[in-house]
Image (cartoon, rainbow, N blue to C red):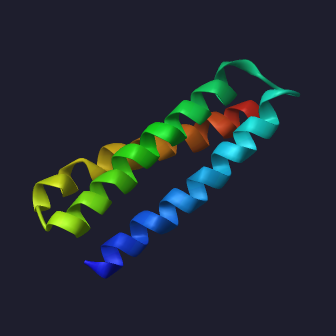
Amino acid sequence: MLAVFETAVRYQMYHALAILLVGLMMAPMGGWAVHTAGWAFAIGIVLFSGSLYLLAITGTTAFGAITPIGGLAFLVGWGCLIIAGL
């Protein structure tokens, strides 16, 4: 369970930095893609890392079913950042 907890912390840290990047991109670029990326990263952190935290703390494997939805939110966020960069 410690490895699951460490994975949650790692992904939360990476995507918190991505949210900071979104904040820096907001002023010069703006637009729907940057805005959507920020929300997608925030939702991904809550669903992905949050479900892994709950899994690690409680041991209830049902929380693991939420994790892929958070991962999908992360992918949407990165996709939107790529669109904004183009």
Whether residue 38 is situated above or below residue 1 in the rendered picture: above
Q: x%, y% of residue 63? A: 18, 53
Q: Residue furthest top?
A: 31
Residue 7 screen position, x and y as percent: 41, 70
In this figure, what is the number of numbered marks?
0
Left or right side of 1 for 58 = left
- Tell me the residue at 53%/41% (across/down): 41
Name the image quarter holding the N terminus.
bottom left
Residue 24 as seen in the image, left or right of residue 64: right
Camera sees residue 48: yes
Seen at 59% across and 60% down, the residue is 14
* Residue at the extreme front: 57
- The answer to whether residue 86 is seen in the rendering is no
| Residue toward you, 60 or 77 | 60
Of 66 and 1, which appears nearest the observer? 1
Residue at screen point 67% across, 38% down? 81
Q: Residue at x 68, y 29 (%)?
A: 34
| Most distant residue in the bottom direction | 2
The C terminus, quarter of image: top right
The residue furthest right is: 28
- Residue 75 vertical placement versus 29 (above, below): below
Q: Position of residue 16 (x, y in %)?
A: 60, 51
